[in-house]
Image (cartoon, rainbow, N blue to C red):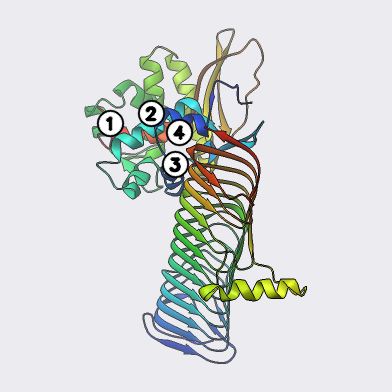
Amino acid sequence: MIHTTNEEDVNVMGGSNLPGGRYRRINAMGDVRMDGDIRCLSMNCMGDATVVGSFQGQKTNVMGEMEFRGPVDAGILNVMGEAKCLSGLRARTANCMGEVEVVGTLNADRLNIFGELRVTGDCNVDRFDSRGGFRIDGLLSGDQLRIVPWHQCHAAEVGGSRIEVCRRRGFLGVLLVWDSLMSAVGLGRDRGLLEVESIEGDEVLLENTTAQVVRGKRVRIGTGCRIGRVEHGGDFASHPSAQIGEVAII
Amino acid sequence: MGDDPNLISKKELLDQTGISYGQLYRWKRKGLIPEAWFQKKSAFTGQETFFPRTEMLARVERIKGMKDDLALDDLADLLAPAPAGLVVGIDGLQSRNIVSKETLDLLFETQPLTDPLSFQAALHGWFVDGLLRNGEIGLDEGRLILSTLAAHHGALQDQRGQFLFLRKRGVGFCLVLAGTGTILPDPEARIVVQRDVLTLVGEFRVILSGDKP
């Protein structure tokens, strides 16, 4: 057990316990268990860390594996390794470059995904930018949502002001040509797809999306889409290759 | 289900109030609209979202009316369930005519209270005071309601539930319903009062903030 006075820097290496409290900077480089509630300005986890209580930090970098058992208020959260939040996550900006799993609700001003995200509840953000994969069991809600499905992406519902889903494109079409060539010889890659039950937004622009219902004032359905029903406010266009069941004006 | 006159569909709400999907989802995210009001029902187009009609229309109008003066976060704070630490002075309640002296006496009869009152006790006083002023209940019934609310209000999670007062053959009784659900009373019993707790909390907070006289 490492004993420390409050508001100081702590470096923890090897297998250790750290008591709950206020710290300035925590560097966890071994197998660290933090008991109680942790408050800190910054946290760097390069090993395998567990926070048993709640966690509040202004900047948190997870380069190893980290498990938060209590609620997390992370300020800026960068995950390049693996993070598990077992009682929800709140962050100003969350950058997921590795794997993040949230049990409960994820609330953030900005959420960027380059790796993989899993949320068992709702995901509430102002801006959402994904170039990775995600599975959200509840609602994905945001002002500006931009999704480039790199892997399989799933949400029960998506709602917001502007929702844009576009298939990934290579530089000067190189990726497209490469994929076409590989497909021709039977080695085609999964180009990524968003699967969702319903999408509702003021402006909805879709590619590579499967949805039961899409509702929006301005709706564009592009290539790679399979939509059961589209309800729009009078501004609608679709690509000839898109598969759409019904279209209705609301 | 879409024919229930007490519910309003999301499409109808947007149409009637002129708000956008973006605004509705933003208000939901900020907690301006209680989660429990979003009710999923089957419709011919699949699952649709419905809201309690009266409460939702009133809430949207209130938000539209106030959002020019307040930031959304402040508005969320105003409309959110009361924080546990909030207290209300008795002098203020009386001088601003929020709760009458008679109802305050009744409140002190039924609960061991000190000045200032907890938000919850003040809410109970204001609620019963309104019913007494409207002549919907008598003094004894007011006493009964205050005792029931004092005993059971604390069990509600996040203020989600309803206060009900029923009367059968002149005998009144009070209920606190936790969560959502339908009350199926004895056919001879009449529901005199049925109020959503979150809505009451929101209205009371607006009154305390001085927004209404």
Q: Amino acid at mark 4?
A: Leu
Give the quadrant of residue A104.
bottom right
Per the image, the residue denoted by label 2 is: B125
Q: Which residue is mark 4?
A: B14
Badge 2 local density, few (<14 within 10 Å), some, or many (20+)?
many
Label pair 4/3, CB-CB below 8 angstroms: yes
How far apart, in angstroms, are the residues tagged by discs 3 and 1?
Answer: 34 Å
* Subunit bearing disc 4: B
Q: Earlier in the sequence, mark 2 or mark 1?
A: 1
Q: Of the residues tagged 1 and 4, which is closer to the observer? A: 4
Quarter holding the N terminus of chain A? bottom right
Asked if the residues shown at circle 2 and circle 1 are in contact, with their CB atoms under 8 angstroms apart, the answer is yes
Q: Position of residue A125 (x, y in %)?
A: 46, 57
Give the residue pinned by disc 1. Answer: B93
Residue A8 has which mark? none
Q: Amino acid at mark 3?
A: Leu
Q: CA distance from mark 2 to mark 1?
A: 10 Å
C-alpha gap between disc 4 and disc 3: 8 Å
Give the label on residue B24, or none. Answer: 3
- Among the two numbered marks 1 and 4 on one chain, the one whose residue lies closer to the N terminus: 4
Q: Residues within 10 Å of mark 3 (few under 14, many from 20)?
A: many
